[in-house]
Amino acid sequence: MGKLEERVISVNRILLKLRVLKSFVQTKFRKFKSRPDIELWQNRQFNKLKKSALTHSAYYSDYTHRPLNEWPIINKRIHLENFNQINTRNLELDEVLRIAEKSEVDREFSPKYNGVSVGLSSGTSGNRGVFVTSDKERAVWAGSILARLLPDFRPQKIAFFLRANNNLYETVKSRYIRFEFFDLMQPMDRHIKRLVKYNPTILIAPAQVLVVLARYWAAGMEIMPRKIISVAEVLTEDDKTLIEGVFKQRVHQIYQCTEGFLAHTCSEGELHLNEDTVLFEKEWINQRRGIFIPVVTDLKRQSQPVIRYRLDDVLVENFVPCPCGSPMTRLKKIMGRFDDVLFFKSVNESEKIQALFPDFICRVISGADRKIQRFKVMQKSADEILVELDDAGIACKAVVEKALVGMFERHKLKEPGIKFSAFEQSPLSVKCRRVVREWAFSDEYAQVCEEE
């Protein structure tokens, strides 16, 4: 490599760090006083996005003179089918998939395509999504996420357990902030010695990994993180209680998916939607109870626009203003994926089908006996469920069955056949799904069972 190339690389790194810093400062100190302030900001950002990026998208260019509510609502299937027309960097889906899949196999995530980084989602629905981002977009993302996860301005050592690395971390690290990647494709035992030596101030991992680390910590693993953050999968109340009980501190959350950085916990430990960077429309399932499916528009993504993208997640809004004072939408919880909502036949034939959400099922099983820590419920059809239980659960499966039968009776649902088997632990690199629906159901607006 010649001196000129070295200088160019050095300049690019400096520019990247400056972009991260700019995004960090803007996110950290941008304050909204009211909902109208947020909506005005979002409208301005969307108009900027239309001019800078969406006019260059073959899929969206004809819509740029229309209000947002006239743009098409899409989902993962539509997005992938039209990927070549949606992206603004002349990328072809087949080539993106080839590069991303090779990176997954090689565990090397630096290759680019037309100047952008490519990657795959974890694919819990069986249909893996793709994401492409430029260096500038990744710098904006990094600054935004760092502004929300750093507890203070002291030097930080961040350990993150994820399925894939992000080379941006290597670019922005400095004497004030260090990153250490722990590959979830590797056995956990290989990581513990390095984790103890590193002794992170911030620990970031999926909930199921934090549970495993809590058990190591209880057995004598010596790390003293100042902040613990759950990412990548739903943090259940049981797991949250276990992790907080072991580490003696609050567990924070970052809600992020292929479609964007969507929510984070505030200083009061409450989840808020990141409405400064993402515009959310709510497809209500039950407005009185605050249950909705988000339709998101990312106001920062330019290489791969995310416009009116209907997620598969089910969220619950908390209508009570947050003590932190932020007017950004406060969430009560993330219920999970709509594809994992279970549907059962009603005793009352006039109603026919009713829906039970995943966290509802989880609370019934964990509430049957507090010794149960690991379980999985798979709905094979409207008439059959399979319940996998750990050793403690198998020992009291009669109690679990009674709790489930009682739940069906209270909600006037026809009791399905309930089968039990031993819990099978999936690799930590696979997202934890405690409730899985394995049969297709098309009526998304079946009556929702009330929570107990």
Image (spheres, rainbow, N blue to C red):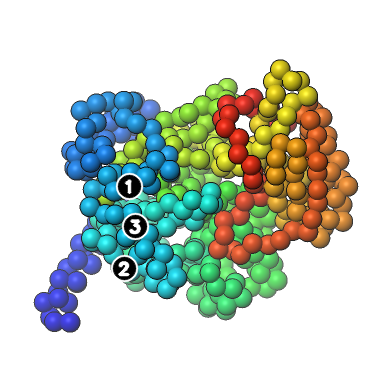
In the rendered view, tell whether residue 88 sits above or below residue 428. above
Q: What is the x, y in percent for residue 265?
A: 49, 46
Position of the C terminus, as image quadrant, is top right
In the image, residue 244 sits, relative to residue 40, either above or below, namely below
- Identity, as a three-letter code, of the amino acid under mark 3: Asp
Q: Residue at x 56, y 38 (%)?
A: 338
Relative placement, left or right, of 191 versus 176 is right
Can the viewer see residue 212?
Answer: yes
In the rendered structure, find residue 111 and report the number of the disc placed on it. 2
Disc 1 and disc 2: Cα gap in Å? 20 Å
Work out whether residue 117 or residue 137 is closer to the camera in this orientation and state it. 117
Name the residue beneath numbered marker 1. Answer: 83
Q: Which residue is mark 3?
A: 94
Q: Secondary structure at mark 2?
A: loop
**Is 426 placed above or below 280 here?**
below
- For the point 82% across and 30% down, the residue is 409
Kindly report which numbered mark, 1 or 2, lies closer to the viewer in this rendering. Answer: 1
The residue under the point 86% across, 40% down is 402
Query: Mark 1, residues whose alpha carbon is within 10 Å: few (<14), some, or many (≥20)?
Result: many
Q: Position of residue 240 (x, y in %)?
A: 63, 51
Q: Earlier in the sequence, mark 2 or mark 3?
A: 3
Question: Dot 1 lies on which element?
Answer: helix
Report x, y in % for residue 227: 52, 58
Q: Amino acid at mark 1?
A: Phe
Q: Are marks 2 and 3 in contact (CB under 8 Å)?
A: no
First-in-chain label (1 vs 2): 1
